[in-house]
Image: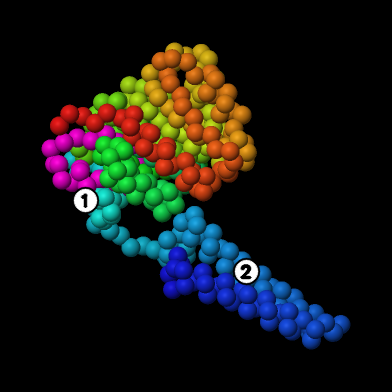
Amino acid sequence: MGLNSIGLLVTFSVLAVAVLATTVWLWPRLSAPRWNAVLGRVGALAVCQAFTLAALGVAVNQYFAFYSSWSDLLGTDTATAPITVAASGLQVLSTRSVPGGRIEQVIMPGPSTRLSEEAYVFLPTAYLKHTTERFPAIIALTGYPGDPRNLMTRLDLPGRMAKAIAQHQVKPTVLVMMRPSVVLPRDTECVDVPNGPQVQTYFANDVKHDMTTHYRVAENRDSWGILGGSTGGYCALKIVMSHPDQFSAAVSQSGYFKTIVDGTTGDLFHGDKSVEQRNDLMWRLANLPAPPVNVLVTSSRKGESDYPATMRFLSAVKPPMRASSLILPSGGHNFGTWNRELPQALPWLAQQLVAPAA
C-alpha cells in the first residue's frame, strides 16, 4: 500500500486498536511479580505505543504531505523525469489536466539571484483556448517550511479559481503556487540577506520574469498580485509594499508584520539596521512613503495571536495605500481557518487585477 493511501491509515488504526484490546485482555496474566511478566508488560506497552505512533505518523504525513511515497521517506527515490527547457530557462517537469484548466509542475530559475524553486502553475481553460491573449497572475505562497502541493490538496486554489471564473466572479487568472523557503532548511523570511540569498528579489523579479517570458501573462503591475498564509502572508505584504512597481495587490492570511529571527533563520541582517527596518512593515508604514497598493489582511478575534498586530497594521495604513480586513469571530492558525476565508479572499484579490486588452 502507498504511504499516503487511505488503506494504510485504516490498517495501522485497526492494528493499534487491536493491540490495545489484546493488551487489556492479557494484562491480568502479566501482573505477576516475575521477571518474565515484567518483560511482558513492557513489551505490550511498547507494541501499543509503536502501532499508535505509526497510525499518527501516517495521518500527520497525509495531512501535511511531508513525504509522497515510501521511497521518498526512506531516501531511495532516485527516479528522474524528462525536462522541457523553455527559452526563459524555466523547466517544465510535468503537466496534467484538472477541472477548469491545466497544472504544470515547473522549476523557476533565478537569472538575477541564482536561486531556483519548484512551482505549480494553474492555467485556466481560457488561457488554453485563447492563444493570443495575456492574463493576470497571482503568486500564491505557503507558510514555512511549506509544500506547494498543499495549496492544491489542502486549500484547492485551482478549484476555487476555476469556480470563481465559471461563476463570472473574476476574469481568468493564472496561479503560480510556491513555497517561500527557497533555500531549505533555512527560513529566510523573504529577506534579501546581505551577502546571502536574495529571496525577496527572487520572487519580485525572477519569478515574474520567468512567468512573463514563458507564459502569456501580463507584465504590468496592475495585473499581478500575491497571496500567502502565515510566513507566506508576511512575504506577500512585504513584497507588494516593497515593489509597488511590480505588484498592485496582496492577501495575507494569518500573516505577521515583522521578520521572525530564530534558530531556523540564522542571522538575516548581518548587523545592517537599515535592512532590518525595511523588513519591518510597521516601520515602513511610519517612515516611508505609502505605496499605491491594495491589501487584504485576515485574522480571528479569538484563537489567533496575530489579531492585535493586525489591527495595529490596519490603523497605520494611509493613502494611497488601501487596506481591507477579513476578521473571523474565532479561528486558528491552520488550513481550516484559511479555507473559511478563501471563498472571499481569493476572488477579492483577482478582482483587484486588471486583465490586459486582447
Q: Amino acid at mark 2?
A: Thr
From the image, tell me which residue sits under label 2: 52
Question: Residue 87 vs residue 336: left or right?
Answer: left
Number of numbered labels in the structure image: 2
Q: Is 350 drawn above or below residue 280 in the view shown?
A: below
Residue 166 screen position, x and y as percent: 27, 45
Image point (65%, 78%), residue name: 19
From the image, tell me which residue sits under label 1: 84
At label 2, counting other C-alpha atoms closer than 10 Å, the crowd grade (few under 14, some 14-19, many 20 or more) is some
Residue span colored magenta: 115-138
SS class, disc 2: helix
Does residue 46 show up?
Answer: yes
Badge number at residue 304: none
Image point (63%, 79%), residue name: 18
Question: Residue 213 vs residue 320: left or right?
Answer: left
Question: Residue 146 vs residue 14: left or right?
Answer: left
Q: Quadrant of the N terminus?
A: bottom left
> Closest to the observer: 1 or 42?
1
Does residue 272 show up?
Answer: no
Q: Is 25 drawn above or below residue 64 in the view shown?
A: below
Residue 159 screen position, x and y as percent: 34, 49
> Closest to the observer: 269 or 7?
7
Give me the C-alpha separation between circle 2 and circle 1. Answer: 44 Å
Q: Quadrant of the C terminus?
A: top left
Task: Kindly indicate whether the residue at mark 1 contacts the one at mark 2 (C-beta within 8 angstroms).
Answer: no
Image point (15%, 42%), residue name: 130
